[in-house]
Amino acid sequence: MSQDSRYAQSRAVTVDDTGVRRTLADGSVESVTWEELKSVVIRVIPEGPWSEDVFLMLAGSDGTGTAVPSGDPAADALIERLQTLPGFDNERFIEAMTTDADEAYVVWTAASV
């Protein structure tokens, strides 16, 4: 991790009926609305077990998005909501969450609906 990685850490993640917002330690905000969500990728980075190594990456069709660490307190609510998306690939999700491979796993795209 770089010296500036502390600024990429979450201060707060909010999952609600509008979408997902992540406020970073430096005060900047990343967000994506459910309406604009176009893809969900699980990114595994072999950094664990002492640092965050799995991220839920959400990309919006309007260029917005965010990456939520799987260890964040809001991750369970986010995962629960993502699993209700039509065409969400639960098998691929389970594969991603149980590996230590340096890989990105696409678990949902808007085209899959």
Image (cartoon, helix red, strand yellow):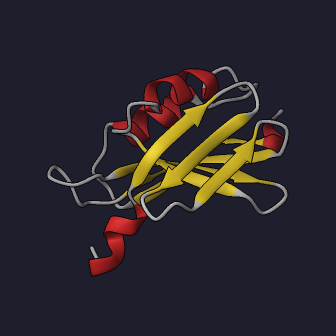
Residue 18 in view: yes
> Which residue is painted at 22% across and 55% down in the image?
51
Taking depth in this image into account, of 53 and 103 the one nearest to the observer is: 53
Q: Quadrant of residue 101?
A: bottom left
Q: Residue furthest front?
A: 27
Q: Residue furthest left?
A: 50
Q: Quadrant of residue 97?
A: top left
Q: Is residue 108 above or below residue 77?
A: below
> Which residue is painted at 46% across and 65% down in the image?
26
Q: Is residue 62 above or below residue 71?
A: below
Q: Position of residue 50 (x, y in %)?
A: 14, 52
Q: Position of residue 62 (x, y in %)?
A: 84, 59
The count of marks equals 0
Q: Position of residue 86 (x, y in %)?
A: 76, 25
Taking depth in this image into account, of 76 and 100 the one nearest to the observer is: 76
Q: Position of residue 53 (x, y in %)?
A: 31, 53
Left or right of residue 6: residue 65: right
Quadrant the N terminus occupies: bottom left
Residue 106 in view: no
> Which residue is painted at 67% across and 20% down in the image?
84
Taking depth in this image into account, of 14 and 96 the one nearest to the observer is: 14
